[in-house]
Amino acid sequence: MKLLIYTFILLLPGFCRADTFILKDGAKLEGEVTGEMDGALLVKTKYGSLTINKSDIQEQKSDPAPASPAELTAALPAAIAVSTETGIEISTALPEAAVAPAPKLTFQTVFPSSMTRQLVYIESGLAIATETFDANGVLALTEGSIGDGTYTEYYPEGGLKTVKTMMSGKANGTLKAFFPSGALQIEAYYLAGGKEGPFKFFTEDGKLLMEAAYKNDRLNGWKKEFGPDGKTVSEFYYIDDQLARPPDPRAVPAAAAAAAEAKTVPAEPESGITVKVARQARGELFTFRLNGKYVGKVRLDKEFNLISQEGKIPDGTIKAYTEDGRLQKEFVYLKNVLKTLNVYEPGGPLKAEYTYVENEAVKKTAP
């Protein structure tokens, strides 16, 4: 019986030792110092090894010496009856635990030197990972593990600075950055860590300052800059980050006419998310893959009601095509929730649009 009691005691937190670091931005990190170099500490945490600049540390605490078995026995919850008498059982009934709140996901931007920039990811006040970027903004090193979810960054005064979503350790979906006043400063879209789609900068009074088009994290399309009056001051056309000859505008109407005649939609840039469609007795099964990697699947019945969903599906619009390449459906996701479904005549006009209320498809009526 004593053996069981001491086994329980040895599992209590009093026997685990680690340093606690309080950072100047309010974040808290627990771990063991494993090395030091160039004014930075190497700290081993349960999330992996992280690098912390000494200048960012406000306070470092060492855990007190472990309590004695007698002290820990005295600290056992009252609901546990401890006895060494033969034939008497130990009751392990404890009050029902409260449901833990969802973790708060934030991140902070720090500058270890004039040549590097770091993003420190924080979950419920504890630093879990860092990303280090070089002077050109290229990701050079990731330490720790970045959990899936939407992360927010705040100004020292408390105002919202940045919002972005991470999936599988990389940025996915919409990224928005704000001025201290709360006005939108940057709006961009990411796919598997790279820019994908429009990238826009705004002035604090809401005027468009610059817009560019990206594909596979490279400039592909027009990059335009605008003056205070909204007029274009420069525009250049790019293909894979290289300046290129713009497409002949006279060819655009001809291409559109040819597409209409063929009853197909013009080709769009690959999003990196592909959809495999399988017909079933009750409806259809849609399997989503991001750069070839499975991320989730959705089952819809014949009235487009949501039967089931698995996995984590990135924010944004996902298009499903027929086997011969014609658009048939568009899924719009936000925070892994299906918000809208557009159903097309294969390769033709929009047939119907649905929103979802408790997984039930609600058809939108024409205005």
Image: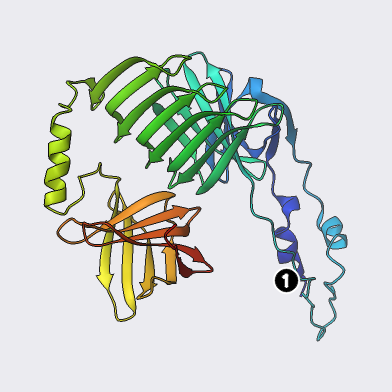
Residue 237 quadrant: top left
Tag 1: residue type?
A: Leu
Q: Relative to 314, is 205 on the left or the right?
A: right
Q: Of 68 and 317, which appears nearest the observer?
A: 317
Point out residue 327 in the picture as x, y percentages from the top left corner: 24, 56
> Residue lying furthest front in this view?
367
Count of labels shown?
Answer: 1
Residue at image point 65% right, 38% down? 29
Q: Residues within 10 Å of mark 1 (few under 14, many from 20)?
A: few
Q: Is residue 302 left or right of 209 when viewed as pictured?
A: left
122 vs 217, nearest the viewer: 217
As drawn, which residue projects farthest toward the bottom?
Answer: 87
Q: Whole-percent x and y of residue 19?
A: 69, 37
Q: On the image, which quarter does residue 76 sit in?
A: bottom right
* Residue placed under numbered mark 1 in the picture: 4
Q: Residue at x 32, y 30 (%)?
A: 213
Q: On the rendered structure, is 326 left or right of 288?
A: left
- Can residue 217 be seen here? The reply is no
Image quarter where the N terminus lies is bottom right
The residue shown at (48%, 14%) is 228
* Residue 105 pos. (x, y %): 60, 44
Q: In this view, does 115 lie above or below 123?
A: above
The answer to whether 238 is drawn above or below residue 284 in the figure is: above
Does residue 286 appear in this view? yes
Quarter of the image for the C terminus: give it. bottom left
- Label 1 element class: helix
- Displayed quadrant of residue 109: top right
| Camera-nearest residue between 64 and 262 | 262
In the rendered image, residue 201, in percent from the top left (x then y), is placed at 46, 25
Is 186 placed above or below 313 here?
Answer: above
